[in-house]
């Protein structure tokens, strides 16, 4: 992708505006820094980033482009005055919003690193450079899936891998001090004893605060555990599985490749693993009440209500999008859901003020936009026509309150 397509025709430098291609000529990687003057964590991180940039990253050929979430041009100028890098012009809000959506920025400060062809290196650049402030691993290219799988196996260790007997492994991230964990653990133990153990071994990966708590909690569990002392392995596994909160249940194959990082909702729907592994793989069409996290990150197509014809039509379109994306969920331009009665579906009704059997496109990353199909979307042609109207700008745009 041409960099002008990402950043627009010009960038601000300390010497004024320059054509984007000129400003970024001869650079080796680009960091996009999403930040704002009003944000305390940003103002704490910016001086650290500036120091690392001056001491290490600039000499390695890195460019940084500030993408501002400031509330006005005055605040933007004051904040940019503290920074030794480039910035998107403040008035170019459309480009900033596109970048936020493209890289799924949900909070600031956020630091995305791309190469000079515009390809994403990592969306978690903040962690990467904080772990490597001298840039010894610059530009922090993440491991390939094969390398990641090997790292996961190494972190678990040969002994525990061997004890799994060639079965897939469920990594259960939990802790004694966590009330939701203590509510879920007995359920998982029941599932395990009643048949799940025939499909997989489970390894407890503890976030307990001390070894005594770990031992007390592990005594309640009928499976294996990563030794508490191996904190480095615990951190590696948490990062590899994208664990952001506990309890979390991820399932891997014996070679370390991932089956699902959403094992908690999968096992609650399929306690004995009757549909494992096929039914536990990422699916192109899901119940929004199970895992609503994509709503904050993706453009989502939602069949509100329980109209069987609409649900079947949306499921069919989802399968077509899935096939067109090479069966890679992450490459689908939209995510697809049904929204039968449930806590998340009820919240969606309140947010959109949509009731009954309606097809909705929700685009929270684009500022909370949503679209409602006027007519019945009970066949594939109607669903496709509505999505085409949304993409072309013909559908009526509404705004979440």
Image (cartoon, rainbow, N blue to C red):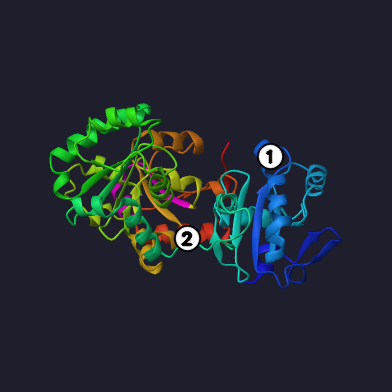
Left or right: where 219 falls relative to 33 = left
Residue at x-position 84% and y-position 58%: 14
In what element is the residue under mark 1? helix
In what element is the residue under mark 2? loop
Pinpoint residue 141: horizontal percent, then vertical percent. 52, 63
Look at the picture and state if 108 lies above or below 342.
below
Q: Nearer the viewer, residue 307 or 147?
A: 147
Report the disc number at residue 44: 1
Does 340 lie within the magenta span?
no
Pinpoint residue 182: horizontal percent, then vertical percent. 31, 28
- Give the spatial CA distance, label 1 vs label 2: 35 Å
Q: Which residue is mark 2?
A: 333
Q: Mark 2: give few (<14), some (14-19) or many (20+) Cα within 10 Å.
A: few
Report the disc number at residue 167: none
Left or right: where 224 falls relative to 212 = left
Residue at x-position 21% and y-position 40%: 223
Quadrant of the snapshot with the C terminus: top right
Q: Mark 1: give few (<14), some (14-19) or many (20+) Cα within 10 Å.
A: few
Does 304 lie within the magenta span?
yes
Sooner in the amino-acid sequence: mark 1 or mark 2: 1
Quadrant of the snapshot with the N terminus: bottom right
Q: Nearer the viewer, residue 313 or 165?
A: 165
Look at the picture and state if 178 lies above or below 293.
above
Residue at x-position 52% and y-position 57%: 390
Pinpoint residue 46: horizontal percent, then vertical percent. 70, 46
Look at the picture and state if 203 lies above or below 392.
above
The magenta segment is: 300-315
Camera sees residue 65: no
Residue 325, image quadrant? bottom left
Pinpoint residue 3: horizontal percent, then vertical percent. 66, 68
Q: Nearer the viewer, mark 1 or mark 2?
A: 1
Camera sees residue 166: yes
């Amino acid at each position: 992708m041409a960099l002008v397509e990402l950043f627009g025709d010009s960038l601000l430098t300390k010497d004024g505006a320059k054509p984007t291609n000129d400003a970024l000529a001869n650079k080796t990687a680009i960091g996009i820094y999403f930040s704002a003057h009003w944000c305390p964590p940003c103002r704490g991180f910016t001086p650290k980033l500036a120091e690392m940039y001056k001491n290490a990253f600039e000499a390695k050929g890195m460019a940084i482009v500030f993408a501002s979430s400031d509330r006005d041009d005055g605040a933007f100028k004051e904040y940019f005055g503290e920074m030794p890098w480039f910035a998107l012009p403040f008035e170019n809000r459309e480009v900033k919003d596109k970048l936020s959506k493209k890289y799924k920025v949900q909070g600031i400060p956020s630091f995305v690193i791309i190469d000079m062809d515009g390809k994403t290196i990592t969306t978690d650049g903040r962690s990467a450079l904080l772990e490597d402030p001298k840039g010894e691993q610059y530009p922090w290219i993440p491991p390939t899936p094969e390398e990641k799988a090997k790292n996961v196996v190494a972190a678990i260790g040969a002994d525990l891998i061997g004890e799994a007997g060639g079965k897939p492994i469920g990594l259960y991230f939990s802790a004694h001090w966590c009330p939701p964990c203590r509510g879920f653990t007995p359920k998982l133990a029941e599932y395990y004893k009643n048949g799940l153990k025939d499909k997989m071994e489970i390894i407890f990966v503890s976030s307990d605060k001390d070894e005594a708590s770990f031992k007390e909690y592990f005594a309640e569990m009928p499976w294996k555990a990563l030794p508490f002392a191996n904190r480095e392995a615990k951190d590696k596994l948490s990062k590899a599985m994208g664990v952001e909160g506990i309890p979390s249940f991820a399932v891997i194959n014996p070679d370390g490749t991932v089956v699902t990082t959403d094992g908690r909702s999968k096992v609650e729907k399929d306690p004995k693993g009757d549909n494992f592994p096929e039914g536990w793989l990422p699916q192109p069409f899901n119940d929004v009440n199970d895992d609503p996290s994509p709503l904050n990150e993706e453009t989502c197509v939602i069949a509100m209500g329980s109209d069987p014809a609409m649900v079947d039509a949306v499921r069919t379109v989802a399968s077509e999008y899935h096939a067109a994306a090479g069966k890679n969920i992450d490459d689908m331009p939209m995510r697809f859901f049904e929204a039968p009665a449930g806590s998340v579906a009820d919240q969606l009704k309140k947010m959109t003020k949509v009731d009954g059997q309606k097809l909705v496109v929700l685009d929270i990353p684009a500022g909370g936009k949503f679209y409602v199909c006027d007519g019945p979307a009970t066949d594939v042609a109607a669903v496709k026509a509505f999505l085409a109207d949304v993409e072309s700008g013909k559908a009526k745009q509404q705004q979440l309150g």
